[in-house]
Amino acid sequence: MSRVPDVQNILSGDRSSLSRGITLVESTRPADISDAERLLNGILVKTGQALRVAVTGAPGVGKSTLIEALGMHLVQSGYRVAVLSVDPSSPHTGGSIMGDKTRMPELARHANAFIRPSPSGNVPGGIANTTRRAMLLCEAAGYDVILIETVGTGQGDTLVRQIVDIVLLMVLPNAGDELQGIKRGILEIADLIAVSKADGTMIDQARLTANTYRRALHLYPGRSRAVKVMAISALENTGIPAIWEAIKDVERATREDGYFETQRNTQIKTAMLETAKTLLLSEFGESKIIDEAVEKFQQQVTRGTRTVTDAAHELVRIYRNMDSKTDLNVEGSS
């Protein structure tokens, strides 16, 4: 079977073709890069219509449980839901547990849901480098809502704002310690805050935590009214419809004031620049001329005849002039 799925099969919602398409755009093999670009060019006209929502928070806060509960609420309401769940990768092997389907068994079986776990790789920020491209494929396949579950590694999760419309931050019902553990950046980009596990003996604690976050938001001018804080229980399925209504409220408000479109335009610009940087770094790192220069400059820095900064500037100069075949003098000193 070809690694390159047929565009029409993806547009018709074929799940097998969608899975193969995501595998293709996640590939780092040089032979797959051009195929991936052709595939993306073929589906672009059908993208951009889904609502993109990130669910972030510390490990153990219940992101997968909430996503399954919210996802089931949505599919039962007639939506088609795609979940892109990023698993932490091993820094040594690059592998990940990839267990999200087992954490969302009911949603995984539903005909109108699609769950795709992906390894985070070496990319910080709780999102995989290819998450945006996988999201576009899911949109082209006809999914109305894209839920992105981040790794949940702290302040780096703020980077998820670069690809979604709405950020839902989940926190545990431990007001004092939990609030101290949340970084300022994530509070600044959250559109909604959900205090999880508001059930059993933790109900009062969850409500107290929600009030603590409401007070904390007053430290951010303009945020206290814009950000809704609520206590929920995915286990008991309480507060889930309210979460979706709050998400829709944010969408309506941002569409009305123009921020929704402005944010997406900014995200496109960011994606172009980041992709260009990645391509430049790849070319730079794969150049034999640069490799030879690095070896020589390293020896000069070790001997104390050239500074690291000067060597870096010279590497950039060499890279800029490689095509013009100018004199690549790497024997000079600072």
Image: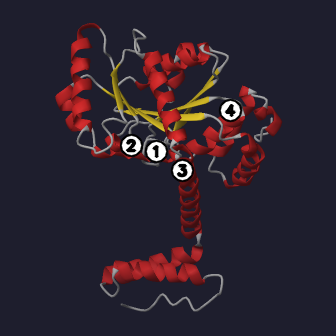
Q: Quadrant of residue 11?
A: top right
Q: Amino acid at mark 3?
A: Thr
Within 10 angstroms of label 2, few (less than 14), some, or many (20 or more) residues? some
Q: Between marks 3 and 1, how big is the CA–CA gap?
A: 13 Å
The C terminus lies in quadrant: bottom left
Q: Secondary structure at mark 3?
A: helix
In the rendered view, tell whether residue 176 sits above or below residue 73. below
Q: Amino acid at mark 1?
A: Arg
The answer to which of 302 and 111 lies nearer the viewer is 111
Q: Earlier in the sequence, mark 4 or mark 1?
A: 4
Q: Quadrant of residue 309?
A: bottom left
Q: Secondary structure at mark 1?
A: helix
The tag on residue 189 is 2
Q: Between marks 2 and 4, how big is the CA–CA gap?
A: 31 Å
The N terminus lies in quadrant: top right
Q: Amino acid at mark 2?
A: Ile
The tag on residue 95 is none
